[in-house]
Image (cartoon, grey):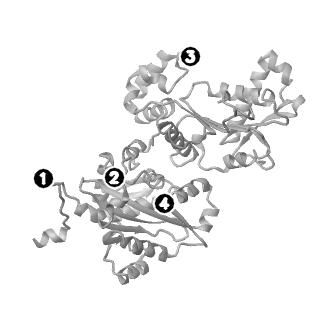
Amino acid sequence: MYGWVHRDTGERRFREALIFVGRKNGKTSLISGLSTYMVAYDDEQGANVYVLANARDQASLLFDKAAEMVKQSPALFKKFGKPKRSSINYAPAFSKMEPRASDSRKLDGLNTHFGIFDEIHEFTNYKLINVIKKSRGTRKQPLIVYITTAGYVLDGPLMSYFEQGVDCLEHLEDDIDERTFYYLAKLDSAEEADDPRLWIKANPNICLMNFVGMLDDYVKDKKDPKEYADWITKQFNLFSDIDELSFVDMPTIKRNNKTIDIETLKGKKCVGGFDLSETEDFTAAVLEFPLETGEVFILQHTWIPQARFDRDNNQERIKAWEKVGDLTIIPGDYVNYEYVLNWFVENSKIYDIVKINYDKAKALRLNKELENAGFETNEIRQGFLSLGGPMQNFKEMLLDGKVIFNNSKLYRWYLSNVKLVMDRNSNWMPSKQSKSRKIDGFAASLNSHAEVLNMLVNPVGTGKVTYYSISDLMNM
């Protein structure tokens, strides 16, 4: 992270870094060491260094550990002097170290040379991260480090940075981000947790840990599902959701990583679905294609109004979705249904949209316009009996890796947000995990899947597939 410099300027190569390791691997000591180094040893005048966390108490705890390091080291104490209550100062360079947090009262006017974030798996938005990033402007070689374990917030900044890191490390030959350093220590699967010889993959400091004690604790905690989930997440760095009513976990979602060229779908049969939700919020539409392989392909698009974007705490993520074409930000305060209508009309020139399924709530006007445009529409009742079967089948297809969405990060986010609600007969309905975790794209595809489920048949010996609806079969 520090060894790479530009051959002409001598300045540091990396401006950001993600260090992803299991708990009890010396993260606090590393934070203290890096922070004190950057205050006094980086040859920077007026170097402002911040130890950062989601809450004030955690940031203060990190600072106190750094202050204790200074007090216990004669060399550091001679250089810095006695730490103050909330700052460590290096007078010759007018530099200092201070704690900051998302709930800190004062976040304006920062001039960051070095910022180190602890446990960003707890962050639900980019507020503090964006403040620190924007405060680097006058620095020659600023550095921001995120050091963390995995966590349960599957739609926060950590998941975004982690996926960027995986993409970078798996595609080194591509046009990668040359200014970000990634160190990702994790198991490759939950199955590896049962082989202690592999634990070092997520715990690089395991030789300094009480290995026998860890092994005893693991054997005991594995019997408790929540304790086991905590081990998998915190010690072995695998993202998971401990809520037993979650629709699917992240490893299952990532199993559906196949891509296809959408040009090959021209003229193919598909079923549309849409979810208007609130027009002041996310609105989504999909086309679902039943494929000859028994798989389905999901083509989706989402719209949000500018007013909704302006108040979102995760604007960086939304802009990334917009950049790849998965989402459109609409001027104004709401999404006019005509955007959805036009999307279906334009796609009908490319694909054979046999039907568009919809939720009656808030959709009567759009449904009439779709019918006027020549589309056949079908209402899908939003109840346990009508959605339970399609939802269960969709999950089975996800478990089998048969849902193709060309690795759309937006659609992956929708899937990770879905929570199950069950009636007394164990029929399913989708719900979102929280107000900020949207499921509109999934809800739209669930409407379409209610029809696609009827169209899917197994390939026959000729390799050709004939599609029949239930009504066709009844008339045979």
Label 4 – label 2 distance at C-alpha: 17 Å
Looking at the rendered structure, the secondary structure element under dot 2 is: strand
Q: Residues within 10 Å of mark 1 (few under 14, many from 20)?
A: few
Q: Please identify, in this view, whether the residue under mark 2 or under mark 3 is nearer the observer.
A: 2
**Cα–Cα span, label 1 and label 4:** 37 Å
Q: Name the residue at 36% across, 65% down.
A: 287
Looking at the image, how many numbered discs can be counted on the residues? 4
First in sequence: mark 3 vs mark 4? 3
Label 1's element? loop
Q: Looking at the picture, does residue 454 appear above or below residue 137?
A: below
Q: CA distance from mark 3 to mark 4?
A: 46 Å
Q: Which residue is mark 4?
A: 326
- Mark 1 vs mark 3: which is more N-terminal? 3
Amino acid type at circle 1 is: Gly
Residue position marked by numbered label 3 in the rendering:
208
Question: Which residue matches tag 1?
Answer: 461
Task: Looking at the image, tell me whether mark 1 or mark 4 is earlier in sequence order.
Answer: 4
Mark 1–mark 3 distance (CA, rounded to whole Å):
60 Å
Q: Residue at x 44, y 19 (%)?
A: 216
- If the image is split into quadrants, where does the C terminus sit? bottom left
Relative to 59, 403 lies left or right: left
Q: CA distance from mark 2 to mark 3?
A: 43 Å
Residue type at mark 4 is Asp
Which residue position is annotated with label 2?
Answer: 403
Q: Nearer the viewer, residue 422 or 352?
A: 352
The local crowd at label 3, few if under 14, some if 14 to 19, many if 20 or more residues have their Cα within 10 Å, is few
Residue 327, placed above or below residue 402: below
